Image (cartoon, rainbow, N blue to C red):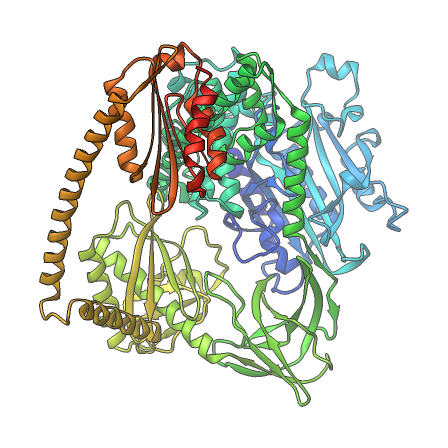
Amino acid sequence: MMTANEIRDSYKKFFESKGHAIVASAPMVIKDDPTLMFTNAGMNQWKDIILGTREPEPRRRADSQKCLRVSGKHNDLEEVGHDTYHHTMFEMLGNWSFGDYFKEGAIDMAWEYLVDVLKLDPKDLYVTVFEGSEKEGLDRDDEAAAIWAKHVPADHIINGNKHDNFWEMGDTGPCGPCSEIHLDSRTPEEKAKTPGRELVNMDDPQVIEIWNLVFMQFNRKADGSLEKLGMNVIDTGMGFERLVRALQGKHSNYDTDVFQPIIKEIARLSGMEYGKDENTDVAMRVIADHLRAVAFSIADGQLPGNAKAGYVIRRILRRAVRYAYTFLGQKEAFMFRLLPVFIGEMGRAYPELEAQRELIGKVIKEEEDSFLRTLDKGISMLNGAMDNLKAAGKSELDGAQAFRLFDTYGFPLDLTELICRENGVTVDGKQFDEEMRKQKERARNAAQVESSDWTELAPGEQKFVGYDYTEHECRILRYRKVTQKKNTYYELVLDHTPFYGEMGGQVGDCGVLVSETETVAVIDTKRENNQSVHIVKELPKNIEADFMACVDTDKRDGSAANHTATHLLDYALKQVLGDHVEQKGSYVSADTLRFDFSHFEKVSDEDIRKVERMVNDMIRRDIHIDEHRDIAIEEAKKLGAIALFGEKYGDKVRVVRFGPSCEFCGGIHASSTGRIGMFKIISESSVAAGIRRIEAKTGKECEEMMYNLEDIIKSIKALFNNAKDLRGVIGKYIEEHDSMKKEIEHFQAQAVERAKETLVQKARNINGTTVITAVLPMEATAAKDLVFKIRQAVPENLLCVIGTVAADKPMLSVMLSDDMVSGHGLNAGQIVREAAKLIQGGGGGQPHYATAGGKNADGLSAAVDKVIELAKL
């Protein structure tokens, strides 16, 4: 029986023998594409080729692509772990032809690989072809059906509808008919009972699609119409996990050697056995699947976070932690301990896992620890809500409350329902669903972008000239209208552009387009499909005019200097901290420099100074840029260029060297390091486990910062009569302040003690309860000390209410002895909330001690009396 690794290798070898270039998987996390967060299909990295904005050579390619489907149209997250074949992260085996072979070549090669190489039984294979669409004006794909007839009998060729057999990436873009290959892996008895063709696309877990051959012929426009692509494209995708399952004779993807080593390690660490209980089985499958998605994402440079792609990764990780917590009894970080087995299985095929092993482990553990703390808070909050329900004689939790638990603490509805069920409480699921619907609607409205079709003015591809020019003659090739959040702007593609489109952390250029009759402001430049897209608020009046494209050179020079400074910083950090330092992200604009890097402890002040000195030394040496454009990637590596994990490089790359600093880079740089002027680090902080962030200033910004510091020092000196020994004078003032503070605290403690003795002596007895009340001018900390001292003096049958005023702010403090809480059922938190209304405030606390602040000091006496009334002594 072939192992998973052997199957993956066999696929690549087969297509290599058919003249395909075997390419590395693109990163799972997509950068510089506003339409996608993650690679969710093998074709994502070839989008610009398909749309004709990049040369298609080599025309035949194949790979095993890491994919993630947990958001947007392709969202399988909730099915993961509950069935046998859905996954978040999965591998897509794919082969492509860009204007080379088409339907016959794709079908023949697929059949040869499955039947002749892998030895699958032809009787178990069924294929689908597009049945056509009268509405779209598309005929049945008779061409594909005729080719399939060479390989399979007629009853194994099945018509498929537009949903199943017309492949589209999204609402717009490349699309075309497709043929799916389905495998029937049922027992002989089941096959005899029901023909496999009747179960194709019927969600039978044993009759599943394993390969989709897409015949990309069209481009879907915004108005829904179809136009022919410039060339026919073959895009096939075979689910690797499903293929392994078929070849290893399993009925579940999770029973293959793709997942079993991880599941066995989960079982060993948790002390539970896989295959004995459905709940624990689902939990183990969820954890095994999600571990892969999170580990690969971190290796590709995406850390868990609170927005966009980072939030998706955090959500996946937290879902796994919830299952481990609820069904496997794991109350401490658990998933990071599975990494050695996982990386041992997949590290050879994907070396980034081994290279990033330490970082992946630290990030996952920190995220687990953090979420487990959050879970504890949420459970405490839920317990409080259930106590309040029972006290009110109710047994159903408000759906809005359940949604707040989900939104704030990551509690899914099923976890809330589980905990509630154990306590005899139900949850209003309909109201929860309504709150979820409202949130999704808000998010949709906030993110919705409507783009019209591109209006073509002239054929051709864009040429970027921004490395050499900041001004250049141009014409507009195409434009479109874009609406987002009720704001309308236009996107332009120029035939020649000096404008750099935002990419690699460097902001896009702005500037103007100038014709003989008008000037149009370019407010930003984005990168899409490997070309610069220029953003303007209004279209030129003469859209077909000749223009001069002029970049704002002040902003360009500022961002170029900051970008070059990040290269020098990267080099200096490696020299000072060690070779483990690796860039994990950056952002550079005209006035900002931010650099994220891998390092597992705070960088000391001494090392910060060393880095600054090294960077500034390279700046003073005024090292000129040594640029190598369009060189082979192997040649670039010989130059010593540093490649970043999580970046996809083509066959030709650009290398930028400044003395000892040498990196792959497509960005805009200063012509020499002297243009940076000066470099100063202003902060160093933690972003995530094992990731540090440096923010710095350069050039004019450094100058302004130094002037600000000088002004601050002058103003401080003026406060101390321009003392020559400023440090000594300030130190003396601090000593005197500390001494005076201790004296004040001593006097305050004496005052609290006297107040306690006086109030205890004046205590009233109401039906056996010692009642102590007062309104005093006193600070909040002193008031807290006072009520606790009173509680020590009167440990039983105590109700103490102290109103205090400090700086015109009233505060109410309520203290109860333990027997008043347990025996009389009083709750200081509930009482103080009600009484605080009289001082126009609110508060809360524990059952025995609570406080409330307010705005109306005149109502303080009435609030004190209200507490006594509410206690019903």
Q: Position of residue 664 (x, y in %)?
A: 41, 63
Point out the residue furthest to the right here.
134
- Is 661 on the left or on the right of 630, as rendered? left
Q: At 10% from the left edge and 57% from the top edge, which residue is drawn?
A: 732
Point out the residue furthest to the bottom here.
516
- Is 805 on the left or on the right of 479, as rendered? left
Q: Quadrant of the C terminus?
A: top left
Q: Is residue 92 visible?
A: yes
Where 525 falls versus 347 (above or below)? below
Q: Position of residue 319 (x, y in %)?
A: 51, 30
Q: Is residue 530 visible?
A: no
Disc tally is 0
Q: Position of residue 854 (x, y in %)?
A: 44, 40
Where 321 falls versus 537 (above or below)? above
- Is 832 on the left or on the right of 18, as rendered? left
Q: At 79% from the left edge and 30% from the top edge, which residue is drawn?
A: 156
Which one is in front, 674 or 836? Answer: 836
Which one is in front, 718 or 784? Answer: 784
Which one is in front, 721 or 121? Answer: 721
Q: Position of residue 100 (x, y in %)?
A: 68, 56
Which one is in front, 356 or 125? Answer: 356
Where 846 falls versus 709 (above or below)? above
Q: Quadrant of residue 264?
A: top left
Q: At 13% from the left edge and 43% from the top edge, which residue is drawn?
A: 743
Where 366 falls versus 555 (above or below)? above
Q: Quadrant of residue 421?
A: top right
Q: At 57% from the left edge and 28% from the top edge, which residue is drawn?
A: 402
